Amino acid sequence: MTITNHLDIANLRKTYANGIHAIQDISLRLTNGMFGLLGPNGAGKSTLMKTIVGLQQPDSGSITFNGTDIIQDPSFIKRQLGFLPQDFGVYPKASALDLMQHIADLKGLPKTKERHEHIAALLEKTNLYEHRKRDVQSFSGGMRQRFGIAQALLGNPRIVIVDEPTAGLDPEERNRFNNVLAELGEDIIVILSTHLVEDVRNLCTNMAIIRQGKVLAYGNPSRFLDSLHGSVWRKVIPKSEKSHYEAQYNVISSYFNSGSIVIHILSETSPEQGFEMISPMLEDVYFTHLSSQN
């Protein structure tokens, strides 16, 4: 029987000594499934992740996991947590198998036949079993990230947090890594912290957009897309006219295409001749909320 897990974050705040308000009154409720925490670099995503896993204390607010206050009792979530930080270091000259055994020791997993089988199954799940005797330091970036997921899953955690996991990976490795993540979200909470809209669009059933420590939007990606239906317009323009359109209209995004610029505009009606209405993409949702804060 699948257990429904609950992570409740209420009115969380964190200000660093240099005066930066890294988390500003964040409230979220997460249950089983993939949850995307989307925002630009420096938005406060990593600070929020570190606070959830107990690496730092908030100034105020609460975090409860399955009914237990994990700010007061951080060991409760640590016993049920898998964490893949943005910078995942490894010991030099340690094989994947030896390193998994070492991390299992650190997590307090008893040395049993079941532990050996558990480690082998995780390396198989992440397509690393045939490389188990290789030094992790020699792995490619994608292999190392998949190893990071394998170690995060030691002990069958009820919540897994991955911070910017696909940054720097090539498309094939990104797809392979995301397939592993997608399988995890059926029975546990998986938090995917990223600035890549495509990863959230492909994987997550719920999401939040965060910027400057604030939640700008929170909910189901499909509902966000429905809210923009009929309101996103596209046009290809010369580069020299970009500032003109930005002054006249609500330009939510722009990108280069064959020497010209493609702009997306948010408008209830056609802005002018030459625009075409398009089905909104999650990128449009993302940039709409970010532009509303400028």
Image (cartoon, rainbow, N blue to C red):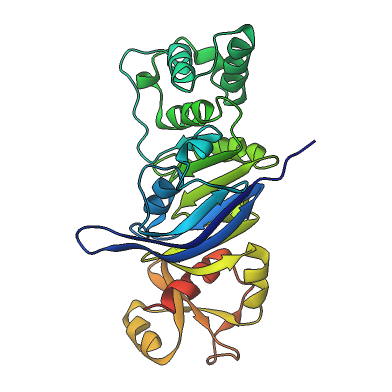
In the depicted view, which residue is nearer to us: 217 or 78?
Answer: 78
Query: Is residue 109 depicted above or below 34 in this figure?
Result: above
Query: Is residue 245 depicted above or below 133 in this figure?
Result: below
The quadrant holding residue 189 is: top right
In the depicted view, which residue is nearer to us: 163 or 112?
Answer: 112
Residue at 26% across, 58% down = 16
Residue at 45% across, 20% down = 103
Asked if residue 294 lies left or right of residue 220, the reply is left
Query: Residue 76 location in percent, x, y?
Result: 52, 37
The quadrant holding residue 285 is: bottom right
Asked if residue 1 lies left or right of residue 107, the reply is right
Query: Is residue 50 depicted above or below 114 in this figure?
Result: below
Q: Check the image and name the residue furthest to the right.
A: 1
Q: Is residue 198 visible?
A: no
Q: Is residue 124 visible?
A: yes
Residue at 35% across, 24% down = 90
Query: Residue 246 location in percent, x, y?
Result: 38, 85
Residue at 73% across, 40% down = 3
